[in-house]
Image (tube, rainbow, N blue to C red):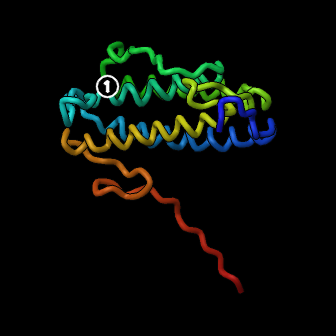
């Protein structure tokens, strides 16, 4: 897709896909909070390699980029200039509270966008020029990528890995009861 390509999404489709992607993002938020909560505060400086981020740096990147990127969608301005406020928060619990509060605000900003705004192409670093709504999928992929990295830190830090898309060794996924109907 070239940078000059116009949006192939109708405003109506963009509005409906927004709802689907925001519902999915909210589910993923809950999973991400579980992974963040598994970081022991006393081991937040753990890094598996000298070239890797610490668990705290990775957790901050994961949470702050979600918020920054969602706000960038609402502002029609996507960049990688994420504020580095990680030292303002002192505990994992504070990070999770900050993440949840700001995620809701950013999601509400996207919900307030008109269908025409959602279908408007936004440039991202000169590499992509896609309809605004499609970046909700992009940011989710970014989140899943870094959340996966963070889960590899958990056991070496002495923590347990939560269930994500299925059971982990440490936790069974919470399943809804199966409802069956009998036919007479």
Residue 130 in the image: above or below residue 83 = below
Judging depth in this view, the residue of 169 and 117 nearest the camera is 117
Q: Position of residue 119 (x, y in %)?
A: 74, 32
Q: Residue furthest bottom?
A: 184
Which residue occupies 52% across, 22% down? Answer: 68
Q: Position of residue 103 (x, y in %)?
A: 53, 27
Instruction: Tally the numbered discs.
Output: 1
Q: Position of residue 19 (x, y in %)?
A: 69, 40
Can residue 27 be spotted in the picture?
yes
Which residue occupies 44% across, 14% down? Answer: 83
Can residue 105 be spotted in the picture?
no
Residue count near mark 1 (Cα–Cα under 10 Å), binned few <14, some 14–19, many ≥20: some
127 left or right of 154 in image: right
Q: On the image, numbered disc 1 is attached to which residue?
A: 57
147 left or right of 4 in image: left
Q: In the rendered view of the protein, which quadrant contains the N terminus?
A: top right
Which residue occupies 26% across, 46% down? Answer: 160
């Amino acid at each position: 897709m070239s940078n000059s390509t116009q949006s192939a999404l109708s405003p109506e489709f963009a509005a409906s896909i927004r709802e689907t992607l925001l519902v999915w993002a909210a589910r993923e938020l809950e999973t991400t909070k579980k992974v963040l909560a598994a970081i022991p505060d006393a081991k937040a400086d753990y890094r598996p390699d000298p070239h890797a981020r610490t668990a705290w740096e990775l957790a901050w990147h994961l949470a702050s980029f979600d918020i920054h990127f969602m706000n960038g969608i609402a502002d029609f301005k996507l960049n990688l200039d994420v504020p580095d406020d990680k030292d303002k928060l002192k505990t994992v619990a504070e990070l999770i509270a900050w993440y949840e509060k700001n995620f809701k605000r950013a999601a509400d900003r996207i919900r307030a966008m008109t269908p025409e705004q959602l279908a408007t192409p936004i440039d991202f670093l000169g590499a992509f020029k896609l309809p605004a709504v499609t970046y909700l999928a992009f940011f989710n992929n970014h989140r899943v990528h870094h959340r996966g990295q963070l889960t590899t830190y958990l056991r070496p830090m002495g923590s347990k890995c939560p269930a994500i898309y299925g059971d982990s060794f440490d936790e069974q996924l919470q399943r809804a009861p199966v409802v069956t109907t009998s036919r007479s």
